[in-house]
């Protein structure tokens, strides 16, 4: 063994030959023991030192690493096992005592004693280097015992880097961070290898080195005849941008420069000049350190390239006189509201010219103006629409625009407009066909020149509602008790839809129909008598004159002869009566109509229908169930009776047999029978009337009774001048014994069309539904075309 003061962290063990790797790496084959304070081994105060074996085959040595580091002072024993054991590659155990026989331990004793060792000394130092430079620093130290020293870096500098450390020369290179100046430092240490160590600081002063500032080139665009402020650009490492000083090196050739502030110059191109121009400038810093003005530097010149553009001026649209606001709509926004009231209140009580609230233009704003304002307050819309079009019609308006730059091409377009509206891009003609009215459309048009500049204008167009055209039509004749058909037609240039009709039938009936049917029907109860036909017998004659004469000069209500309804019967009424006196037949019903849509109610034309007078001859032919209607104007025919009674609950069927006999051959006597329940019995009598009467006595057994007649109508011998009327209908009329028409008899008549076949069978039903039971009536039935 021996004694050492050295500090070490591993032991190197040499062998005579290569080892078995497993046994060489087994930590159980090694022991390093500290004898403890009593310096006696194998006592209770011994300490085992933790080891790790590192071996690589086929080396003949291995390293025992001291896990806990450098050994402290004391006595130590190292044992390498030959008994457990460490083997060579042939399987031979360690010959630890070198006696030629393997299987025994190798034991080595040594002592660590540093009690006489002195600490080394590291020497601090100060170094200087220029900004952005580098310096090699030699580290120094000493040891009182003369031990060799090892140098190392304890901490790195904050503002630079260390490199190229040389242990043998004790040197290291220091490089400050780019552009840094000031103070930096790092710490190094010396080690004598015996746990003696000392640290020292190397302080480095980085002296400033001013960097040259930089001026930046730039490109600037300036409009013709327009000044442009230009901010010059520069940079410096040490000096803040705001502290840099800018100077013009060369002036522009086609303009002027005027200093505004700091780095800002105003460039104004020469009048009407367009093209390129330029000037140069430089920037100066404040030295290093910044602001010290020590060694200030100026940059190389930079160039500002200027392009002076030809200016394109925007086109303009001529004002469009579209609407006139209400008086009081001061902000012209289409309503007289609180905003306008605020404006009015602000000027109320003031005098002078140009006051917008001076609505009566008398140079003061007083109560007269307030009255005008209040009259319009709350109104929405415009007083006058100067641009308008009827719905369904086409509106055209040409937009006019001008451009101060000659040679520019103007293009028109729509920014906003109603559906279907267009504008001609070349001419500016705006076109719109509104589908419906009333409505207003807001239109925004745009005009763009060749350079892309534009102007817009907004205007309002009003679409007017157009009343629909209502037309009613129908035949000019009607028959009491027979359904009359009125045709309805409506046309509207817009999209409005008729929602209801109101028909005035002129008989006291005003009928409302929902929707928009193509036709409606109405049944008149009676013909319309002329004014003055007081007995309603189809003529204004002496009987009516007697009635008028009896009331002439009377006053009061309910006078039938008060034809002008003024409460007396006087000459005014006589003039009316006289205008109709002698008229035979019936007056016309004036049928009129109204129809409504979402925009209003409108009136139609008026048509006139009348019950035509009965005619003799070929147009008055009695029913002939035997197969023909006689068309002989000289021989109208006469009737015989062949009656058939119906069963109870069914109307009796009366079948008429019309014979081609002179009228005077009609039977002159009445015949009658007793009808059954719900039956009608007819009696016929002769007559010399030209209308070929069939006289009936009707006995009604219950509330409703009816009888029917059937027969064939032969049009074959009908006059050729009436061929176009083959769609005429056959009608029956009842007339009671005192010549007043009893039209309740006719309730159902089959309509026939004999265009293709002149022989048609018809069915006619008559019903007396509004008379009381047991009512007896005697009257005629007459048939006629029409």
Image (cartoon, rainbow, N blue to C red):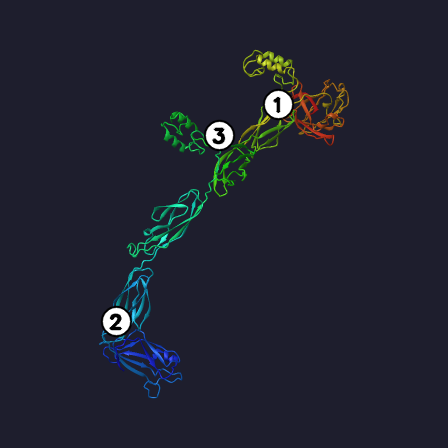
Q: In terms of depth relative to the viewer, which is nearer, 621 or 185?
A: 185
Q: What element carries label 3?
A: strand
Q: Quadrant of residue 119?
A: bottom left
Q: Which of marks 1 and 2 is in front?
A: 2
Left/right placement of residue 265 relative to residue 39 reads right
**Circles 1 and 2 in contact, beta carbons < 8 Å:** no
Measuring from the top left, give residue 660's x and y in whole percent. Answer: 77, 23
Query: How many neighbours does mark 3 have within 10 angstroms: few (below 14), some (14-19), or many (20 or more)?
Result: few
Measuring from the top left, give residue 518's x and y in whole percent. Answer: 61, 32
Measuring from the top left, give residue 14's x and y in whole percent. Answer: 34, 81
- Distance between mark 3 and mark 1 Cα atoms: 44 Å
Q: In terms of depth relative to the viewer, which is nearer, 21 or 303?
A: 303
User: Disc 2 marks which residue?
Assistant: 141
User: Disc 1 marks which residue?
Assistant: 589
- Distance between mark 1 and mark 2 Cα atoms: 142 Å
User: Image height check: is 214 above or below 203?
Assistant: above
Mark positioned earlier in the residue sequence (3 or 1): 3
Q: In terms of depth relative to the viewer, which is nearer, 193 or 784?
A: 193
**Circles 3 and 1 in contact, beta carbons < 8 Å:** no
Residue 717 can be seen, yes or no: yes
Q: Quadrant of the C terminus?
A: top right
Name the disc covering residue 729, or none: none
Left/right placement of residue 350 relative to residue 597 reads left
User: Disc 3 marks which residue?
Assistant: 384
Number of labels in the image equals 3
Mark positioned earlier in the residue sequence (2 or 3): 2
Mark positioned earlier in the residue sequence (1 or 2): 2
User: Image height check: is 180 above or below 86?
Assistant: above
Query: How many neighbours does mark 2 have within 10 angstroms: few (below 14), some (14-19), or many (20 or more)?
Result: some
Q: Nearer the viewer, mark 2 or mark 3?
A: 2
């Amino acid at each position: 063994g021996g004694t050492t003061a050295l500090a070490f962290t591993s032991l190197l063990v040499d062998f005579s030959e290569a080892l078995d790797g497993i046994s060489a790496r087994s930590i159980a084959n090694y022991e390093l023991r500290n004898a403890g304070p009593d310096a006696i081994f194998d006592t209770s105060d011994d300490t085992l030192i933790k080891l790790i074996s590192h071996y690589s085959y086929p080396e003949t040595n291995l390293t025992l690493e001291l896990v806990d580091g450098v050994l402290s002072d004391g006595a130590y024993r190292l044992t390498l096992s030959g008994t457990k054991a460490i083997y060579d590659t042939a399987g031979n155990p360690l010959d630890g005592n070198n006696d030629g026989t393997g299987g025994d331990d190798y034991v080595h004793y040594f002592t660590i004693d540093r009690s006489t060792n002195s600490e080394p000394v590291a020497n601090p130092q100060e170094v200087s280097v220029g900004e952005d430079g580098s310096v090699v620093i030699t580290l120094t130290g000493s040891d009182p015992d003369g031990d060799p020293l090892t140098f190392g870096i304890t901490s790195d500098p904050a503002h630079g880097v260390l490199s190229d450390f040389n242990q043998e020369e004790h040197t290291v290179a220091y490089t400050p961070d780019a552009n840094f100046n000031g103070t930096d430092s790092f710490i190094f240490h010396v080690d004598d290898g015996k746990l003696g160590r000392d640290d020292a600081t190397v302080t480095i002063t980085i002296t400033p080195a001013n960097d040259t500032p930089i001026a930046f080139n730039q490109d600037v665009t300036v409009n013709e005849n327009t000044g442009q402020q230009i901010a010059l650009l520069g940079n410096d490492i040490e000096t803040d941008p705001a502290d840099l000083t800018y100077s013009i090196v060369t002036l522009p050739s086609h303009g002027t420069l005027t200093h505004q502030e700091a780095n800002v110059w105003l460039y104004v191109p020469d009048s009407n000049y367009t093209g390129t121009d330029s000037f140069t400038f430089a920037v100066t810093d404040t030295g290093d350190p910044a602001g010290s003005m020590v060694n200030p530097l100026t940059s190389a010149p930079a160039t500002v390239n200027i392009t002076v553009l030809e200016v394109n001026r925007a086109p303009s649209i001529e004002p469009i006189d579209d609407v006139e606001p209400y008086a009081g709509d001061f902000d012209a926004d289409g309503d007289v509201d609180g905003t306008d009231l605020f404006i009015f209140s602000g000027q109320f009580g003031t005098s002078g010219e140009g006051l917008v609230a001076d609505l009566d233009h008398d140079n003061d704003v007083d109560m007269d103006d307030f009255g005008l304002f209040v009259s319009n307050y709350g109104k929405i819309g415009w007083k006058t629409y100067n641009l308008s079009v009827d719905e369904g019609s086409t509106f055209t308006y040409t937009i006019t625009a001008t451009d101060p730059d000659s040679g520019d091409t103007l293009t028109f377009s729509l920014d906003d407009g109603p559906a279907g509206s267009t504008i001609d891009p070349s001419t500016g003609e705006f076109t719109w066909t509104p589908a419906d009215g009333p409505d207003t459309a807001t239109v925004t048009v745009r005009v763009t020149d060749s350079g892309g500049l534009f102007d817009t204008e907004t205007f309002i167009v009003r679409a007017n509602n157009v009343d629909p055209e209502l037309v009613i039509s129908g035949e000019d004749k009607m028959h009491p008790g027979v359904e009359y058909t009125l045709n309805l037609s409506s046309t509207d240039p817009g999209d409005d839809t008729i929602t209801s009709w109101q028909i005035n039938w002129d008989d006291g009936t005003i009928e409302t129909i929902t929707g928009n049917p193509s036709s409606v029907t109405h049944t008149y109860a009676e013909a319309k008598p002329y004014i003055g036909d007081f007995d309603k017998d189809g003529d204004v004659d002496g009987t009516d004159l007697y009635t008028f004469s009896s009331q002439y000069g009377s006053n009061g209500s309910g006078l039938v002869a008060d034809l002008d309804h003024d409460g007396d019967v006087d000459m005014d009424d006589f003039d009316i009566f006289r205008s109709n006196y002698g008229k035979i037949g019936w007056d016309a019903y004036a049928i009129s109509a109204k129809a409504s849509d979402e925009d209003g109610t409108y009136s139609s034309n008026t048509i006139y229908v009348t019950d035509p007078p009965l005619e003799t001859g070929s147009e008055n032919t009695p029913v002939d169930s035997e197969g023909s209607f006689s068309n002989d104007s000289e021989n109208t025919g006469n009737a015989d009776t062949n009656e058939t009674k119906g069963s109870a609950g069914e109307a009796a069927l009366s079948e008429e047999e019309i014979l081609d006999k002179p009228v005077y051959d009609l039977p002159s006597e009445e015949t009658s029978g007793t009808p059954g329940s719900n039956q009608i019995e007819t009696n016929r009598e002769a007559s010399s009337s030209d209308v070929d009467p069939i006289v009936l006595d009707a006995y009604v057994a219950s509330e409703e009774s009816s009888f029917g007649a059937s027969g064939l109508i032969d049009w074959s011998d009908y006059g050729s001048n009436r061929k176009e009327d083959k769609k005429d209908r056959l009608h029956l009329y009842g007339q009671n014994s005192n010549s007043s028409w009893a039209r309740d008899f006719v309730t159902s008549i089959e309509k026939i069309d004999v265009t293709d076949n002149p022989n048609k069978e018809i069915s006619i039903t008559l019903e007396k539904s509004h008379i009381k039971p047991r009512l007896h009536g005697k009257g005629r039935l007459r048939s006629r075309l029409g």
